[in-house]
Amino acid sequence: MSPTNILSETDKPEHEQTLLSLPDVPLLKVLAYLRLQDLGAAGLATPRLGALTRTHSSLWRRPGKDKFESVERVADLLPVAPPTDRLKLDVDCYVQGVGASFEGCDSELVVQVPAAEDAARLIPKLAPSLRHLNIFGLEIDELFHNLKAARRIETLRANVLVSEENSKLLWPKGLVLASLHTLELECDEDEPGEATLRALRSMLRALSGLRSLKLTSAELLPILDACPSGLRRLDVKAGEGVAKALRRLRGQLRELRIKMTWPWPHKEEVDDLLKSWSGPLERLELIGVTDSPLRLDGLPNLQDLVLHYFSHFPHGYCLAPTLAGLTRLRSLALLSAPAPAVLHDISCDVIPALELLVVGGIGGCGRSPCHSEDCPFAAKQDPVQLLEALVRRAPQPLHAVSRLDCNTWSGPRLGWRVMFAHPEGPPGTEAETDCRLCRQAAEAARFYSPPHRPIQVRGVQVR
């Protein structure tokens, strides 16, 4: 039965209650049972239902994707769906029909289609409001063609398929994406050919407003020689020639993230690069640091440092050489469980500007289950007590953020604690609520937690 038939009030006894006669709350419960296509039809049926479907995004979020006859039927939902400026489009020739869903708190529209022609018909329909585009499964020429209809996008994530047949493919003349500031590229080939690299170079040269670039494949490092002068943030995977590719960008980068893989085949390249770095770098994130001490002598302006060991920082890991000379370091994050000896290397005498210390994976109590962010057993762990001592001795306000691994990875939420030494007031008072560092600590806990995972943050006053 269609929504229009469901809502019809004709030929019904006067005492019989119709859907439209229900108050909003029970009516919303009924609407939640409708498929997306029927929900859209209901929203189009009356102004009241349209207002409800537009303002209650939870109606549209449900597991899996609903099937549609075409991308046009998906586009029909937009006038009565929650406003969204995000599209994730997956072109997969092995799927049958069109699938769509709304995901996340920002109601991202996620669509799966079998052919590039479907993408070309859908994107123009979203173009006026589209700001963030994730697109997968298109060849480079198809990607370039679709971007002509998405000139207002601000962020783009693209996985491109490569056809070396079109060896002269370049960025379309006259195509300007003036608002695009963030780009993430990945390639389906292990070793993309010169035609692919040439096409992607032409893309980078055309994006003069680009500020942030992420390359998920080390094989794409050669295109870095085409980066615009305004690039400020770079995220790369270490590969052959990584040092050479990054050196020419030293004078402009403010943020750098490097991911290394075991068994660290490019360790010496990365070590030499960072040791001799000269430039205004303010934030450095290293994923997969090695056992050997890391020296950052060339980074006196560094303010934020993030280190991630593969499993946990071993007992023999020496952090002191890394921190030496980082007098402007404001925040330090160790995102793998550190041994107590590692925390002993952190001294406010060496890094006097330190305000925020984030430590992931503090050993838990071992009970099962235990999902308490205030576990009394975990609080007695040596790392926790070392962090409290650091907060207590700091010459200026220092906030330490730690995640307690009391089986919380399999539990309903992650437990974080923020340790501080406020001059007055117990946790939860105005001093904590108005504290800038408390807010930054809570933001760090969310940032370093898995996406879409509930967390709980508790403040602990250190006496």
Image: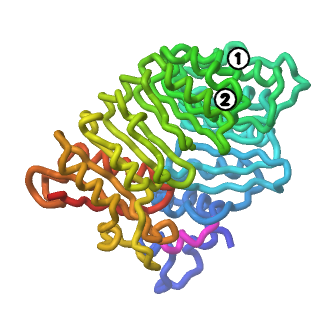
Q: Label 1 neighbourhood size at 10 Å, few (<14), some (14-19), many (20+)?
A: some
Q: Position of residue 404 (x, y in %)?
A: 39, 63
Residue furthest to the left: 424
- Is residue 382 at all visible to an observer of this figure? yes
Q: Secondary structure at mark 2?
A: loop
Closer-to-camera residue (167/328): 328
Q: Compared to 225, does 442 lie above or below?
A: below
Which range of residues does the magenta coloring cover? Answer: 29-35
Quarter holding residue 236: top right
Q: Compared to 135, does 416 lie above or below?
A: below
CA distance separating discs 1 and 2: 19 Å
Query: Looking at numbered disc 2 in the image, what kind of residue is underneath it?
Result: Ala
Among the two numbered marks 1 and 2 on one chain, the one whose residue lies closer to the N terminus: 2
- Left or right, 188 with respect to 64, comes to right
Q: Residue 409 magenta-drawn?
A: no
**Residue 202 tag number:** 1
Residue furthest to the front: 316
Closer-to-camera residue (431/221): 221
Q: Label 2 neighbourhood size at 10 Å, few (<14), some (14-19), many (20+)?
A: many
- Left or right, 291 with respect to 26, comes to right
Q: Compared to 165, does 37 lie above or below?
A: below
Quadrant containing the N terminus is bottom right
The total number of labels drawn is: 2
Residue furthest to the right: 165
Q: Position of residue 150 (x, y in %)?
A: 63, 30
Closer-to-camera residue (75/209): 209
Q: Please report the residue visible at 77 percent of the width from the left and 55 percent of the height from the top.
A: 69
**Residue 149 tag number:** 2
Q: Position of residue 144 (x, y in %)?
A: 73, 26
- Is residue 22 at all visible to an observer of this figure? no
